[in-house]
Amino acid sequence: MRVSRQIGAFKRDRNLAVLQEALAQGEHLRLSRAFLGVLLKAIHQESINHQIKVLYQEAPPSRAAP
C-alpha cells in the first residue's frame, strides 16, 4: 500500500483527480474502459482488505511499569 500513498502524494502535488488520472493513463496505454473499471475496483477492494487487517489487528501488549 506504500505505492498507493505515493500515488496519492503525486496526484495531490499536481492537483489531479484520482479516477480521472487512472483512466487517462489507462487510455494512453490503450486499455479499455471496461478493463480499467475492473482493475480499479480490484485495487480498491484490496486496499479495503488491507485496511480491515490493520483495523482488526490485535493491539500490541502494553508494557507494565517496572
Image (tube, grey):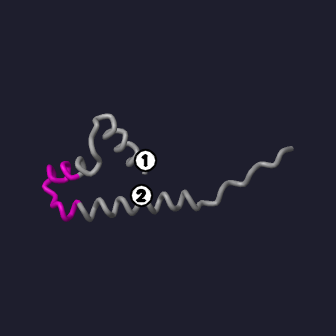
Residue at the farthest right position = 66
Mark 2 residue type: Ser
16 or 54, nearer to the observer: 16
So how many labels did they put on this image?
2
Measure how far apart labels 1 and 2 are at the Cα level: 11 Å
Under circle 2, the secondary element is: helix
Under circle 1, the secondary element is: helix
Image quarter of the C terminus:
top right
Locate residue 9: give its quadrant.
top left
Is the residue under label 2 in contact with that under label 1 (CB below 8 Å)?
no
* Image position, residue 56 (x, y; %): 58, 62
Mark 1 residue type: Arg
Residue 26's place in the image compared with 39, above or below, is: above
Say whether residue 63 is left or right of residue 40. Answer: right
Query: In the rendered structure, which segment of residues is drawn in magenta?
Result: 23-36
Residue density around tag 1, few if under 14, some if 14–19, many if 20 or more, within 10 Å: few
Q: Main secondary structure of the magenta part?
A: helix
Locate residue 35: give its quadrant.
bottom left
* Image position, residue 18 (x, y; %): 29, 48
Q: Which mark is residue 49?
A: none
The residue to which callout 2 is attached is: 47
Residue density around tag 2, few if under 14, some if 14–19, many if 20 or more, within 10 Å: few
Say whether residue 28 is left or right of residue 36. Answer: left
Name which of mark 1 and mark 2 comes first in the sequence.
Answer: 1
Q: Is residue 7 magenta?
A: no
Residue visible at 29% across and 59% down in the picture: 40
Q: Is residue 24 magenta?
A: yes
* Image position, residue 3 (x, y; %): 38, 47
Residue visible at 40% across and 45% down in the picture: 5
Residue visible at 28% across and 62% down in the picture: 39
Residue visible at 72% across and 54% down in the picture: 61
The residue to which callout 1 is attached is: 2
